[in-house]
Amino acid sequence: MKVNYEITKEDFIRYNIHYADNSKSHKIRMNSIRIITALCFGYLFSILWIMMFYYDYYICYYSNLVGVIGGLIWIFVYPKIYQLQIKNSAKNMIKEFQGFNLSKRSITIDEENVMVESEVLTQIIKKRFIKQVKEYPDMILIYFEEMKVSFIPTRFLEGNLKECFLKELNSR
């Protein structure tokens, strides 16, 4: 089975977001930054207000309350900020490498191999090295061993072709 497809700038950005959402290291990094920053924000805000109004207990109480509320708001807002950072870094990668990973490609699946061809290179990977196949509404991600990932936008897999494609990939 052979499927021809093209990767656009938007596909590459969405791929990076999907990859970050499924990556343990990205989740650990995002959650640690999220919590540490919230704690620092709350603590520093409280200390500043206590230093300014040392003897007024009501202001100290309210400053602690504002610090905690600000930290909680940060915890809920930071995932959106993190996704924007991922989008911006993907856009910068594309600009920096002038069309990085953007090209017409084809993927061919036979009995034993998966062959991904682009204008620049050809990869042949044994089907047994497929670790996982994840399906999203906009793309299919194929995780190979050794941290390699290929993705196919689903707009090129119309009708019955998508089901046949997934069936071929999962027959390892």
Image (cartoon, grey):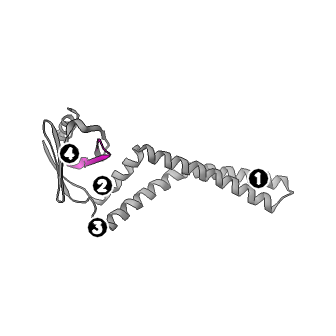
Q: Earlier in the sequence, mark 4 or mark 1?
A: 1
Can you identify the residue that label 4 sits on? 157
Q: Secondary structure at mark 2?
A: helix
Q: Using the rendered view, name the quadrant where residue 44 is placed.
A: bottom right
Q: Nearer the viewer, mark 4 or mark 2?
A: 2
Q: Which of 79 and 99 lies nearest the eye of the viewer?
A: 99
> CA separation, marks 1 and 2?
47 Å
**Which numbered marker is on residue 62?**
1
Q: Amino acid at mark 4?
A: Leu
Q: Is residue 96 left or right of residue 62?
A: left
Determine the image quadrant of residue 86: bottom left
The reply to whether the C-beta atoms of the residues labelled 1 and 2 are less than 8 Å apart is no
Amino acid found under the numbered disc labelled 3? Gln
Compared with 55, 139 (above or below) is above
Percent position of residue 36, x then y:
60, 50
Residue denoted by label 2: 11
Q: Residue at x 55, y 48 (%)?
A: 32
Q: Position of residue 66 (x, y in %)?
A: 70, 53
